[in-house]
Amino acid sequence: MTVSLLRRLEGKVAIVTGAGRGIGRAVAVRLAEEGAAVVAAQRAKAEGDELAGSLAASGHRATFVATDVRDERDCERLANTALETYGRIDILCNNAAYLGETHGALDASDEEWQRCFQVSLMGTQYFTAAALPHMLRQKSGSIINIASVQGLVGARNSAAYTSLKHGIVGFTRSVAYDYGPYNIRVNAICPGAIQTRVSPKPGDELYHRQVGKTFLGRVGAPREVAMAALFLASDAASYVTGAAIPVDGGWTAM
């Protein structure tokens, strides 16, 4: 029996936003491991340089462009860099998001609302608008928007963040509707409790509350979200579009 060693994304080019850490980094690494050339968008230059260097040292194709997703011109510049460097754009993972200290209806400031809106929703719009013309020319593409379980259900003291993540799910379904006829698939991943630098620490009350909401009795790892992104980026998901897929240990099934 012959086992194929062909990687699932060989020859593809992927843009990943917020790629320097957490879920974004895990997605960038996993797509690169499967053969994609990765163009990483990250505001913090040190983190972006480290990611690109780490991927290159492992034999992967990677380019980093310092990018503020709130700036439409920055997003267009990165898309142009992807085209100039690798000749195409096949995959876009809109991962960049903002989560402040206070985002409830009574305590979130106008600045908090605006930053959530500009980073999470407008950043997704700017990058989608930058990538779509090139996907249309190819008549193919996969756009993966990282939402949250808070794009499907409510959460405590989280009006701003929850509202914007619901917006990401709505945006995903609308763009999927418009561009399905051009073989461009658009899906959202809705992570639950995932252990990142901003997550509650084991032992915290919120940590135990999150664990208690899952069927699996644990928080997830960024790589588990990245595996869902790999599926949606690959031809294995060729008939999947307009979906909002929970990666949440069962949280939203309760």
Image (cartoon, grey):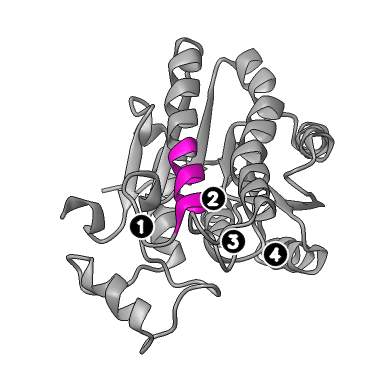
Name the residue furthest top.
181
| Residue 115, percent from left and from top | 67, 50
Q: Residue 248: name its quadrant.
A: bottom left
- State how far apart marks 4 and 3 are (Cα): 8 Å
Element carrying mark 2? helix
- What residue is pinned by disc 3? 25
* For marks 2 and 1 on the same chain, the one whose residue lies earlier in the sequence: 2
Look at 80% across and 69% down and name the residue there. 46
Q: Which residue is mark 2?
A: 31
Distance from the alpha carbon under mark 1 to that under mark 3: 26 Å
Dot 3 alpha-carbon crowd within 10 angstroms: few under 14, some 14 to 19, many 20 or more: many
- For disc 1, the marked residue is 155
Tag 4 or tag 2, which sits nearer the N-term? 2
How many marks are shown on the rendered structure?
4
* Residue 135 image offset from top left, x and y in percent: 62, 21
Q: Earlier in the sequence, mark 1 or mark 3?
A: 3
Disc 4 vs disc 1: which is toward the camera?
A: 1
Classify 52 as above or below 237.
below
Which residue corresponds to the image point at 33% horizontal and 44% vertical from the top-left? 152
Check if mark 4's residue and mark 3's residue have beta carbons within 8 Å.
Answer: yes
User: Any mark on residue 51, and which?
Assistant: 4
| Closer to us: 98 or 86 | 98
User: Mark 1: which secondary structure?
Assistant: loop
Q: Which callout, 4 or 1, points at the residue further toward the start of the chain?
A: 4
* Amino acid at the residue labelled 3: Arg
Q: Which span is picked out in magenta?
A: 158-167
Q: Is residue 97 above or below residue 199?
A: above
Q: On the image, which quarter does residue 50 sit in?
A: bottom right
Residue at horizontal 79 percent and vertical 64 percent from the top: 49
